Amino acid sequence: MYYSMIRKYYLDGYGYPKRYYSDADLDKFVSKGMLTKEQSESLKAEKGSDK
């Protein structure tokens, strides 16, 4: 449910000036149950691969 919004903010950023969710934010979302561990890992891998 939150995945697409979190993914967008994590990869593309939001606001002005641009801010991005950090890896620590992803871990927080996992602990709150907003993301699964697998979703978090795949986002980190996706972000890592486009640097």
Image (cartoon, helix red, strand yellow):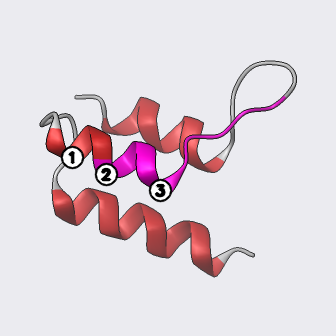
Which amino acid type is shown beneath numbered disc 1?
Val
Q: Is label 2 in contact with label 3 (beta carbons under 8 Å)?
A: yes
Residue 27 in picture, x, y percent from top left: 31, 51
Q: What residue appears at the point 43 percent right and 51 percent down from the top-left corner?
A: 24
Residue bounds of the magenta highlight: 18-27
Q: Is label 1 in contact with label 2 (beta carbons under 8 Å)?
A: yes
Q: Secondary structure at mark 2?
A: helix
User: Residue tagged by mark 2?
Assistant: 27
User: Residue tagged by mark 1?
Assistant: 30
Was residue 10 drawn as part of the magenta stretch in this picture? no
**Sequence order check, earlier mark of 3 and 1:** 3
Quadrant holding the C terminus: bottom right
Q: Secondary structure at mark 1?
A: helix
Which amino acid type is shown beneath numbered disc 3?
Asp
Q: What residue appears at the point 27 percent right and 58 percent down from the top-left corner?
A: 39
Q: CA distance from mark 1 to mark 2?
A: 5 Å
Above or below — where is 23 with respect to 42? above
Other residues around mark 3 within 10 Å, as few (<14) / some (14–19) / many (≥20):
some
Q: What residue appears at the point 81 percent right and 31 percent down from the top-left corner?
A: 18
User: Residue tagged by mark 3?
Assistant: 23
Q: Is label 3 in contact with label 1 (beta carbons under 8 Å)?
A: no
Give the farthest residue toward the left. Answer: 33
Q: CA distance from mark 3 to mark 1?
A: 11 Å
